Amino acid sequence: MQSRIEVLIEKKLIGKSLAMSFLANTTEVLWREFMPRREEIHNRIGTAFYSVQLYSADFFTDFNPAATFTKWAAVEVADYNIVPAGMECLTIDGGLYAVFEYKGDARNAAEIYQYIFNTWLPQSGYVLDTRHHFEVLGDKYKKNDPDSEEEIWIPIMHND
């Protein structure tokens, strides 16, 4: 599995969000609401879509699949000057990220996340940070396709 460490510069996004849990996962509903309206965002940067999650500080230490988190379906924008009605602004703070290149059907991604959190992270010299987690769904992303490609960005900090 390809991975790298990157310093992210702050990103501005516009999209829609929903509170959900892994047990009551409404990701499909979120994207179904967002995608028909994506063309309303006129100050977009690039063509990628962002699937963003914000978890509580103890979410992974006391993991409970029924615990809620917030998830966004969004695109990157140059500024927040024009925000379509019913959409929200989201700023992803800059900082250190571990980036993993995932190839495969997103429905089978549990294995990669288990690897990241249970193998890679404990051996890396880094610890999980409490900033946003996100996936970049670029031109090679294909919904429910084994040939799909995306980047998984995990916020990290040095284990000092």
Image: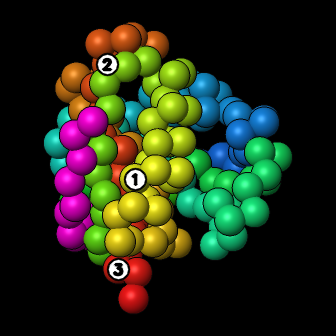
Residue 100 is situated, as x and y percent measured from the top left of the image, at 30, 44
Say which amino acid is labelled 1: Trp
Closer to the camera: disc 3 or disc 1? 1
Residue indicated by mark 1: 120
Residue 122 is situated, as x and y percent measured from the top left of the image, at 46, 62
Gap in angstroms between the C-alphas marked 3 and 1: 14 Å
Q: Which is more toward the observer, 123 or 93? A: 123
Say which amino acid is labelled 3: His
Closer to the camera: disc 3 or disc 2? 3
Q: Which residue lies furthest to the left in this view?
A: 46
Q: What stretch is highlighted in magenta?
A: 1-13
Q: Which residue is drawn at 61% across and 33% down?
A: 27
Is-magenta flag for residue 3? Answer: yes
Residue indicated by mark 3: 158
Q: In this view, does 71 lie to the left or right of 20?
A: left
Q: In this rendering, is residue 109 above or below 74?
A: above
Q: In this rendering, is residue 55 above or below 86?
A: below
Question: Residue 89 falls in which quadrant of the image?
Answer: bottom left
Q: Is residue 126 left or right of residue 52?
A: left
Q: What element carries label 3?
A: strand
Q: Badge 1, how many Cα within 10 Å: few under 14, some, many 20+?
A: some
Gap in angstroms between the C-alphas marked 3 and 2: 31 Å
